[in-house]
């Protein structure tokens, strides 16, 4: 009878779970309960005692097994992470490969939700409904929004396996104004200057080394017929100065930093004040407006986004374009790999600086699977995860443009020294947008102000910037981070 009972216990155990380890846990508890019940009182009738004990054992064991069975779904749930991403149809394949590789290593499954549209609204609804995923991959600049919503789990870099191999520049992007880290960077990108090499060499000019050289080269490309077709149909410099999504501010940021300026300055205790009244901002806008008024920028620059501007370089209309490494493959096709070169940004009045951007993975406070989530983060920043993300061995669009891991050889992965140049530029001169609760409205008001300055060759630049600076301070006040 006892052996039969044990046999049925084993069968019941495996009916609950196909996982051997889980079954052993259940069976151990089952047998332990049975053994404990065998402590007989020698003064009682043995046969009666056996019947009573076996009855108790069955009841206790079934209760125990039922209790454990109720817990097993949570064990299985812990094997699946819910992850939000923002990916194109092509780059989703890279994320899929990341998930499959990770599952083979750990047994943990990844279920993605691609939040490409209405992301902010989806996020707000999920937060209100307590339906957030375990992890969210988003732009690094989103950190302020996540912190303000109170949904993101702080991260301690030293507790992340492989965290010591992440570039300091990348880690800074995940650090908020309170000094804490709220995410882990997984991808980066930065910007350099694409130049029509064939035009430059035809005109016998050197690569530009400073702002003055950029201006001079822009004039030569505009007025000296670099394509040799005898027509006045070329321009020197591509300027996406649209106010749409703050393009003008986004594009000019690198040049503002090269002049020693900034949008805002920290004043301590997590507070800031606008800094667009400084001479560096006037110098930057004067340089940019000078090319607009000299008519060396592409037609329609004042209303152009990056998407609008790309055809100008590809078609042979314009000769210089400040952009990211993701355009290398595109420009290799048109105007052709041998027709252009890409160089680090020529130095501004105070040196080199270039906008850095990237993707950060955020762990949600509400996640019940933080240990598993951290394992996925650690895989994504590992050399293997980074190389998969960079599209190594794949024809799909990468989700990691520049690796944030010092151990990854970008040149070897892409087999292209131009990518290596971008990687070095990022590590040495990359600079992220200031971390405030919400950068979007600040980017928008500065974009509108910059656009207004660029559109009028007679406007008073310092006076215009003073007005823009006041709007920046007003926005900082709304976010409760305005200092004196």
Image (cartoon, grey):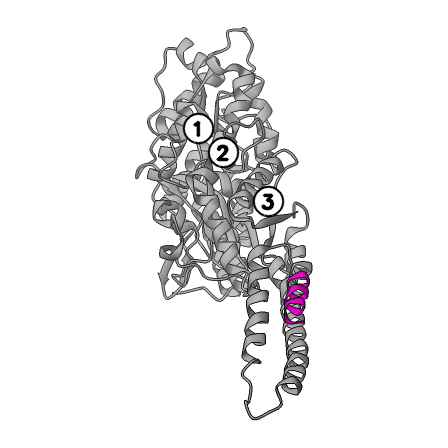
Contact (Cβ within 8 Å) of mark 2 with mark 3: no
User: Which residue, given by chain and number where applicable, does mark 3 sit on?
Assistant: 245
- Asked which quadrant contains residue 33, the reply is bottom right
Residue that carries the numbered disc 1 in the rendered image: 413
Q: Are marks 2 and 1 in contact (CB under 8 Å)?
A: yes
Residue 179 percent location from the top left of the image:
38, 61
Residue range highlighted in magenta: 1-12
Measuring 58% from the left and 55% from the top, which residue is drawn there?
A: 20
In the rendered structure, the answer to whether residue 145 lies left or right of residue 77 reads left
State which tag comes first along the sequence, 2 or 1: 2
Q: Quadrant of the image for the C terminus?
A: bottom left
Q: Residue at x 40, y 11 (%)?
A: 201
Earlier sequence position, callout 2 versus callout 3: 3
Label 2 residue SS: loop
Q: Residue at x 67, y 55 (%)?
A: 122
Q: Quadrant of the N terminus?
A: bottom right
Alpha carbon distance from label 2 to label 1: 8 Å
Q: How many marks?
A: 3
Of residues 453 and 347, the one nearer the viewer is 347
The x and y percentages for residue 127 are 63, 63
Mark 3 neighbour class, 10 Å CA radius: few under 14, some 14 to 19, many 20 or more: some
In terms of depth relative to the viewer, which is nearer, 280 or 30? 30
Q: Earlier in the sequence, mark 3 or mark 1?
A: 3
Is residue 69 one of those drawn in magenta?
Answer: no
Tell me the residue that label 2 is attached to: 390
In the image, what residue occupies the spot 62% across and 90% down? 45
Magenta span contains residue 10: yes
Q: CA distance from mark 2 to mark 3?
A: 27 Å
Q: Main secondary structure of the magenta part?
A: helix
């Amino acid at each position: 009878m006892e052996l039969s009972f044990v046999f049925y216990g084993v069968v019941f155990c495996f009916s609950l779970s196909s996982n051997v380890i889980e079954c052993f846990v259940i069976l151990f508890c089952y047998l332990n309960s049975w053994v404990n019940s065998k402590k007989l009182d020698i003064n009682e009738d043995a046969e009666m005692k056996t019947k009573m004990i076996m009855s108790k054992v069955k009841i206790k064991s079934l209760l125990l097994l039922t209790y454990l069975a109720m817990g097993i779904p949570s064990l299985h749930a812990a094997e699946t992470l819910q992850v939000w991403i923002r990916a194109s149809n092509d780059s989703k394949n890279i994320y899929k490969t990341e998930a499959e590789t990770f599952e083979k290593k750990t047994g943990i499954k990844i279920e993605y939700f691609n939040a490409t549209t209405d992301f902010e609204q989806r996020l707000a609804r999920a937060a209100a409904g307590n339906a957030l995923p375990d992890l969210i991959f988003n732009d690094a600049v989103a950190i302020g929004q996540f912190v303000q919503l109170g949904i993101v789990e702080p991260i301690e870099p030293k507790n992340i396996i492989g965290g010591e191999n992440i570039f300091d520049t990348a880690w800074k992007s995940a650090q908020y104004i309170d000094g804490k880290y709220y995410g882990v960077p997984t991808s980066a990108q930065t910007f350099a200057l694409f130049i029509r090499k064939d035009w430059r060499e035809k005109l016998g000019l050197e690569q530009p080394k400073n702002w003055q050289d950029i201006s001079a080269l822009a004039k030569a490309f505009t007025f000296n017929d670099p394509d040799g077709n005898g027509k006045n149909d070329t321009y020197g410099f591509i300027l996406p100065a649209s106010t749409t999504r703050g393009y003008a501010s986004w594009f000019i940021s690198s040049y503002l930093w090269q002049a020693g300026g900034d949008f805002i300055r920290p004043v301590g205790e997590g507070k800031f004040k606008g800094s667009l009244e400084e001479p560096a901002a006037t110098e930057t806008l004067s340089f940019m407006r000078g090319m607009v008024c000299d008519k060396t920028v592409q037609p329609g620059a004042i209303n152009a986004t990056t998407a609008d501007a790309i055809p100008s370089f590809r078609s042979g209309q314009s000769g210089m374009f400040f952009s990211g490494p993701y355009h290398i493959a595109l420009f290799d096709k048109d105007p052709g790999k041998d027709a252009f070169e890409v160089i680090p940004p020529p130095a501004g009045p105070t040196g080199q600086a270039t906008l850095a951007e990237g993707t950060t993975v955020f762990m949600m406070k509400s996640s019940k699977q933080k240990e598993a989530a951290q394992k996925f983060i650690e895989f994504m920043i590992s050399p293997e995860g980074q190389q998969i993300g960079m599209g190594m061995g794949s024809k799909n669009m990468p989700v990691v443009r520049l690796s944030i891991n010092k151990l990854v050889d970008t040149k070897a992965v892409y087999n292209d020294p131009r990518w290596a140049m971008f990687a070095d530029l990022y590590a040495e001169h990359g600079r992220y947008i200031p971390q405030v609760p919400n950068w979007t409205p600040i980017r928008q008001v500065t974009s509108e102000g910059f656009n207004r300055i660029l559109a009028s060759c007679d406007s008073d630049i310092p006076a215009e910037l003073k007005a823009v600076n006041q709007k920046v301070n007003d926005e900082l006040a709304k976010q409760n981070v305005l200092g004196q």
